Image: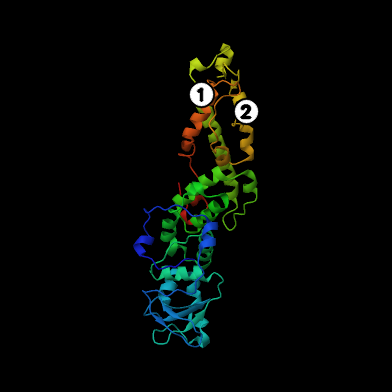
């Protein structure tokens, strides 16, 4: 994780948009550092352990040790924020029941945690100290995991809500979207949860859905997602047909009243009927939509120069190019899954 010394107002500015960085580039560029020293904290040298004591709270009454960190913290802040620390700091869990939190002689508690950088970030947030948003998506997953374990999600939620806004969801792959969905679930971010499910529905293939392990989220979330994926594909099909329906009467030839009633339209050049044959026209083979994601299917290609009939005036060529020009509206009003349907705490009674 990068250095956490940053102006608090800047770190929490939800309106400041930045371009998302790929986890791969961040991982390769991230510097390797030891425990940082901050200008806003006092540091004492501890000779036996050769580890600096960082005072997150100068009037703290407890020392936490984990990994390369020794932190002077407020036991009251931790108890009010995390059920885990409420149990950890009970009097009977201290040595002989006498080493209670004290400003005069703060006792030391050791936490065995592999993700020490993430725990350190949590401790700074709980003590209202400035932090920098995580740059690697994997850090968001680890942060959600630890906050879910320690029970401190509510205290971190405002930070997570702000940080997610710095990412362009439409540019994230399925795995990254699943990580952010888990984070939105843990931190109970209802609006973000719904938006992410819509992006997942557009990005996920049937194969990716089958291999998705939603645990510890409710299992029925996975079933509901496949229905949302199908809804997304229906929207794509409907939008394509709506684009074709815009063909004017001068561009088509109605062969009979029966075909009129069936809304069949035929290109004068290639003789293709709408809607059946047009589903196999050019780069719009609708049968392929079931085997790939909507996002991949809608990826713009080289604009058509002519239709299957070889004529540049083929109306279906115009329809294809028009579709790619306006496809951004396909999922604009699509409703995603609701967090309150999976989290009893946010369930709204009718």
Task: Please provide percent x and percent y for residue 112.
Answer: 56, 75
40 sits to left or right of 227: left
Task: Please provide percent x and percent y for residue 59.
Answer: 36, 80
Badge 1 marks a residue whose secondary structure is helix
Residue at the spot x=59%, y=21% of the render? 310
Q: Earlier in the sequence, mark 2 or mark 1?
A: 1
Q: Which residue is mark 2?
A: 280
Q: Nearer the viewer, residue 252 or 106?
A: 252
Residue at the left extreme of this rendering: 9
Splitting the image into 4 quarters, where does residue 272 fall?
Answer: top right
Q: Is residue 214 above or below residue 290?
A: below
- From the viewer's perspective, is the residue at label 2 or at label 1 nearer? 2
Q: How many marks?
A: 2
Q: Is residue 170 above or below residue 160?
A: above
Mark 2 vs 1: CB contact within 8 A = no
Q: Which residue is mark 1?
A: 245
- Mark 2–mark 1 Cα distance, whole angstroms, equals 16 Å
- Mark 2, Cα crowd under 10 Å, few <14 / some 14-19 / many 20+, is some
Task: Please provide percent x and percent y for residue 148.
Answer: 52, 63
Splitting the image into 4 quarters, where does residue 317 fall?
Answer: top right
169 sits to left or right of 42: right
Disc assigned to residue 84: none
Residue at the spot x=56%, y=12% of the render? 257
Badge 2 marks a residue whose secondary structure is helix
Q: Is residue 291 visible?
A: yes
Residue at the spot x=43%, y=54% of the render? 166
240 sits to left or right of 285: left
């Amino acid at each position: 994780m990068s250095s956490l010394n940053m102006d608090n107002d800047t770190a929490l500015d939800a309106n400041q948009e930045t371009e998302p960085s790929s986890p791969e580039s961040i991982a390769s560029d991230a510097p390797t550092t030891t425990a940082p020293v901050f200008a806003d904290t006092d540091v004492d040298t501890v000779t036996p352990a050769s580890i600096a004591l960082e005072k997150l709270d100068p009037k703290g009454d407890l020392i936490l040790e984990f990994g390369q960190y020794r932190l002077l913290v407020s036991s009251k802040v931790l108890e009010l924020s995390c059920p885990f620390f409420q149990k950890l700091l009970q009097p009977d869990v201290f040595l002989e029941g006498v080493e209670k939190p004290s400003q005069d002689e703060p006792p030391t508690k050791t936490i065995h945690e592999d993700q020490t950088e993430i725990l350190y970030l949590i401790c700074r947030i709980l003590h209202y100290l400035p932090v920098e948003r995580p740059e690697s998506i994997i850090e968001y997953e680890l942060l959600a995991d630890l906050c879910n374990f320690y029970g401190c999600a509510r205290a971190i939620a405002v930070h997570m809500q702000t940080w997610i806004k710095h990412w362009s969801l439409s540019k994230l792959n399925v795995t990254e979207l699943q990580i952010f969905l888990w984070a939105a679930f843990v931190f109970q971010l209802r609006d973000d949860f719904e938006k992410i499910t819509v992006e997942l529905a557009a990005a996920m293939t049937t194969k990716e859905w089958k291999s998705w392990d939603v645990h510890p989220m409710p299992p029925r979330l996975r079933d509901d997602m496949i229905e949302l994926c199908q809804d997304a594909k229906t929207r794509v099909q409907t939008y394509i047909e709506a684009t074709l329906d815009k063909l004017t009467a001068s561009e088509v030839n109605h062969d009979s009243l029966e075909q009129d009633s069936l809304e069949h339209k035929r290109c004068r050049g290639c003789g293709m009927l709408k809607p059946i044959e047009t589903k196999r026209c050019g780069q719009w083979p609708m049968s392929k939509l079931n085997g790939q994601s909507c996002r991949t299917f809608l990826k713009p290609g080289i604009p058509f120069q002519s239709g299957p009939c070889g004529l540049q005036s083929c109306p279906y060529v115009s329809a294809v190019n028009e579709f790619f020009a306006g496809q951004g509206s396909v999922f604009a009003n699509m409703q995603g899954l609701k967090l309150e349907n999976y989290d009893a705490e946010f369930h709204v009674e009718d």
